[in-house]
Amino acid sequence: MELHKHDLSARRWNAELCHHLCTEHRNKFDEWWNPDRFDWENASWVLAKYCHEHFDKWWNGEKFDWKKSWALTEFCYMHLSKWWNPDKFNWQDASWTLAKFCYMHFNVWWNTKLFNWNASWALAQYCHKFFNTWWNADKFEWDDSWTLAEYCSDYFGKWWDPDKFDWKDSSGVLAKHCAKYFDIWWNPDKFNWEDENAFSALVSCCADYTDIWFYDYLKRFRLTKAVIHITDFNTLKLRCALED
């Protein structure tokens, strides 16, 4: 519907109309924008998503619905210096979006006390360059320790803890991304041998240490003879056979 066909005379626009204006008529923003009639409570996130190019015209930190902070981090990260307010930001639900979309402004928003550490995986994945600033072994969510192995391998010596690491679900990631630290982390009693992907990663990425882990494999499964069948050089599938 063309802009002039909308009834914009209402004292307060409903969320549906606000959404339509932002999505369909953002190129005519100046013609319809009215901060007093806009439904800030239910549609301010739509402004952030679709009208970020007009940010300076509509931004109002008092009216914006801060429960939808994620919309600012995802779509208005380029304007962070203008909207950032640590006291109003929804740390509980949107901490991870800061790490993902505003990592370039890390030194502006980082707050170890306010950050929701349940989202610490996002720090490892997107803010690994600032590892030395945010790392806290007591606050990190170790159920997501695979992110440390995959994205923070350069800091292995600082975060590695065999008692906290998630061996059950992350053994394969450890073998794949931290192979050069094999001598430090290898533990045949904790490695998840039952995980086919983990075993495959051990074979393909830790080949330089085969004499160590393969011997442990034989002992663990009480094998007296091993036969290696390379059916696919890229995956290096390894099979073992019992000797009578």
Image (tube, rainbow, N blue to C red):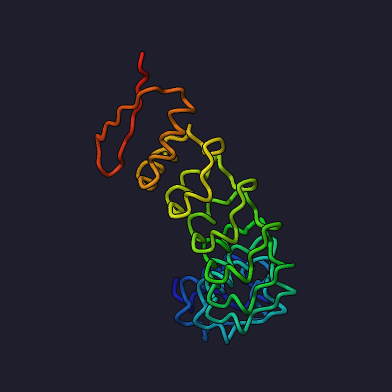
For image coordinates 75% across by 74% down, the residue present is: 87
Q: Is residue 114 above or below residue 120?
A: below
Is residue 18 something that shows in the picture? no
For image coordinates 52% across by 70% down, the residue present is: 129
**Residue 10: image x %, image y %?**
65, 75
Q: Is residue 99 above or below residue 194?
A: below
**Residue 217: image x %, image y %?**
44, 32
Q: Residue furthest top?
A: 244
For image coordinates 46% across by 22% down, the residue present is: 222
Foreground of the two, 191 or 19 = 191
Q: Is residue 10 above or below residue 160?
A: below
Indicate the quadrant containing the C terminus: top left, top right, bottom left or bottom right: top left
For image coordinates 52% across by 77% down, the residue present is: 51
As drawn, is 2 to the left or to the right of 230? Answer: right
**Residue 172: image x %, image y %?**
46, 44
As drawn, is 171 to the left or to the right of 10? Answer: left
**Residue 16: image x %, image y %?**
57, 65
Foreground of the two, 160 or 147 = 160
Indicate the quadrant containing the N terminus: top left, top right, bottom left or bottom right: bottom left
Foreground of the two, 12 or 143 = 143
Is residue 55 something that shows in the picture? yes
As drawn, is 192 to the left or to the right of 136? Answer: left
Q: How many marks?
A: 0
